[in-house]
Image (spheres, rainbow, N blue to C red):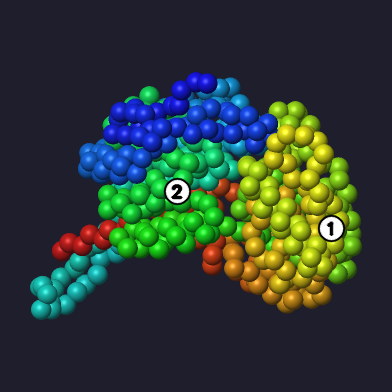
Amino acid sequence: MATAPQLLIGGEWVDGGDGAYEVVNPATEEVVGLAPEASVEQARAAAAAARDAFASWSRTAPEERAELLGRAAERIRARFDELLPLVIAETGCTAAVGKQMQVPTAWTRFETYARLAVESQDIPLPPQEMPATALAPGGLMGALVRRVPVGVVACITPYNFPIVNMAGKLGPALATGNTVVVRPASQNPLAVIELVRILHEVGFPPGVVNVVTGSTPATGEALVESRDVDMVSFTGSTAVGLRIAEVGGRTMKRLLLELGGKGAAVVFDDADVRTAVTMIGSVWTFHSGQICTAPTRAIVQRGVYDQVVDGLAKLAAALKVGDPYEPDTVVGPVITAAHRDRIEGYVRSAREEGGEIRAGGERPEKPDRGFYVAPTLVAGCRPDMRVAREEIFGPVVVAIPFDDEDEGIAIANDSDYGLYDYVFSRDTNRAFRVSRQLRAGNVGINTTQRNHHAPFGGMKYSGVGRDGGVFGLHAYTEMQSVVWPG
């Protein structure tokens, strides 16, 4: 087997201090390659290297940062044919998702922040006439609000979209003059290491971008504890996010936490049923439900409840589960055997609590290797059932009936999560009225499509802060007010 790739710390490529570990293809259960096992000391060294590089990098001209980000985008695009199979092998995503949403979105995000890097974020304020006080003489006081980089950012990302999610953090962080320590998910760090290699090759100075990896949480926790780290940008589970908030709070770290979701799709009697079914079905068709924005709770008004449930059951039965490389495969594997077992445990729980399994519910017979879960629909659910309350992060949809608008809103909001909800109705006034009452950071009306210029983030246990588009620049900067006598 080939040797493990190396870590990048302070501009130097070094072996993992604690050896290496295997990265497994979830579709075949075969080893994709070895990943370096960083030591806690190496994580601390990476944070210190980023701290040393910050003063110089934060003073670089925005045009220089933009040029480097643009070069990175070009290099990612040029290596598409090389990166795509690696991402598919590490994540188990289908070829369609990989070609459309994994590698291309990564270079698009670097292109976006290459453009935004040169746009001024300063906000001039109108002068204010101030009387003389014990502080200072009176006069006409000018003021400016500028955005300055936070400092050293630990970028910790999940396994579902490894280089896309990392690009969404690195782009705005580097554009605004921060230095970074990259810590990818333990399950699939190899493509992220290649992404960091690209940044190194295009000319980012030593220490500006560093990467540490590991099979345990130890290196991530070391970064969160480090006094050299000013900000933690984390995407992942709520449980880990709570731990980061607890540990990071001891050193007053700036936090950007994009955590779990239990998306509610509120379907009214006047909805286009076919559209609602297709959009809710994205839980199954888009990366096997391993996405925090998935509309996993179908909250359906009784007038169309049977139609929606029947439509979802038929859709689930028609979807091909199998080899991600085959062009007609729609549902690939989930990331690990342990995660598959966890999802199956939720389905058993649903049966025990009185849910009706209308599709799936059993492990697919084929393929006979890999961590596959059949598209599953649980109908007749109550809002208090475990399967309706906890994030499953897999290809499972629960259907809950409701009678009137107020009840539908109440069921949707009766959740610890508040990341992405959806409303389906032909009545535009009602759809917008309901969207205003949903306790979620994002609401889709008659669609699950995204607008990447919109701020993205959650309420409640779904996280803290917003990124995306120009709001990503805001997320990685602090506001500094400057006042002077006119």
Residue at the disc numbered 2? 217
- Write the residue at 32% across / 39% down: 42
Q: Is residue 188 left or right of residue 67?
A: right
Could you tell me the amino acid type at mark 1?
Ile
Residue at the disc numbered 1? 357
Could you tell me the amino acid type at mark 2?
Pro
Q: Residue 216, percent across and down? A: 46, 45
Residue 481 lies in quadrant: bottom left
Above or below, 368 against 155 in this view is above
Q: Quadrant of the C terminus?
A: bottom left
The crowd level at tag 2 (other Cα within 10 Å; few <14, some 14-19, many 20+) is few
Residue 175 lies in quadrant: top left
Q: Residue 469, percent across and down? A: 49, 47
**Which numbered disc flags the more N-terminal residue, 1 or 2?**
2
Cα distance between the residues tagged 1 and 2: 36 Å
The crowd level at tag 1 (other Cα within 10 Å; few <14, some 14-19, many 20+) is some
Q: Residue 427, percent across and down? A: 77, 65
- Write the residue at 63% across / 47% down: 338
